[in-house]
Amino acid sequence: MRLRVAASAFNAADNGMRAGFLAIPVVFPHVPGYDVSGTIDAVGDDVDGFAVGDAVIAFLSMATDGGAAEYVIAPADALVAAPTSVPLADAAALPSVALTARQALFDDGGLEAGQRVLIVGAGGVVGKYAIALAKRAGAYVIATASPRSAEAVRAAGADEIIDHTKADVLDAVTDQVDLLLNLAPIEPDEFTALVRLVRDGGIVVSATAWMPAPDDADCGVRSVVVFVRSDAEKLAELASLVDEGVLALEVTRRIPLTELPALHAEAAEGRVAGKMIVVP
């Protein structure tokens, strides 16, 4: 399938691949932008369910050329209908971050209704999606956030918010949780200490792929590091949740494609806050 690109999203992994410290087997020259939205411009042979003119989104393989371009070739099995309640360009901000939140909570974390989840670093885009998805599933959500993001975390649906700049999370969480989800670049020792907040038989899930997730075998607490996976069926569900108002799509900045090198330079100097989309 060939897409006329409406936008691609900038992700930290794009910067990591460019800088060479993320072990994704790309072939150079490489076009970044594995989150993409656009309109189908041409349909390949033996493709059913799509037509020229359809508005779609996709989470593309990180190892292949992405959507930071005017056109991109995408496999049909990666495409889903774009949400209709938001601008098509903005929809590029959804795929990998929403899939990460969903897979961390349910595929890897096994979260169920009535359970308690602690989300560390909930103020980012993945964190706010995770809060909304966990609340929709009937879980009780405790979230850590800074004062800057506290209101957005509250709006996402958190039951408790811990200001990690003032309070010790270990003291602030009074009852153990079933799932600890870490999304923050915390120190390994701090991460390990948080495991005592997890009940016997619970689970620790981490999206910080650069360090192992701690566990506690004596208490039956296991751990897993989530690596986002392409899943068109789940992505279609997430797109529908945007249209239903369950997920609030976040776009912090919109930049033209010509400014993408400057954005990479900015990311190389430090973390880029929020969610950026790149418009050709």
Image (spheres, rainbow, N blue to C red):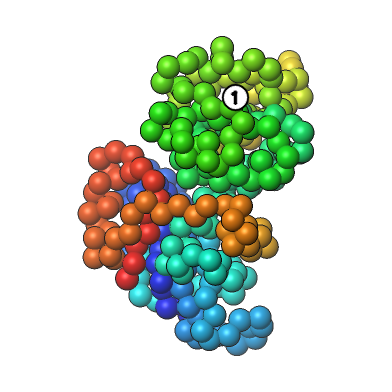
x, y (%) of residue 107?
A: 69, 45
From what the image shows, is residue 116 above or below residue 233? above
Residue 157 visible somewhere in the drawing: yes
Residue 227 visible somewhere in the drawing: no
x, y (%) of residue 259?
A: 24, 60
Q: Amino acid at mark 1?
A: Pro
Q: 257 or 46: which is nearer to us?
A: 257
When asked about the image quadrant of residue 165, the answer is top left
x 51%, y 84%: residue: 53
From what the image shows, is residue 141 above or below residue 56? above
Q: How many marks?
A: 1
When asked about the image quadrant of residue 240, the answer is bottom right
x 42%, y 28%: residue: 146
Q: 265 or 8: which is nearer to us?
A: 8
x 53%, y 36%: residue: 154
Q: Is residue 271 left or right of residue 166?
A: left
Please give the residue where the numbered disc 1 appears in the rendered image: 214
x, y (%) of residue 265?
A: 24, 49
Furthest toward the top, the residue is 171
Q: Quadrant of the C terminus?
A: bottom left
Q: Secondary structure at mark 1?
A: loop
Q: 276 or 271: which is nearer to us?
A: 276
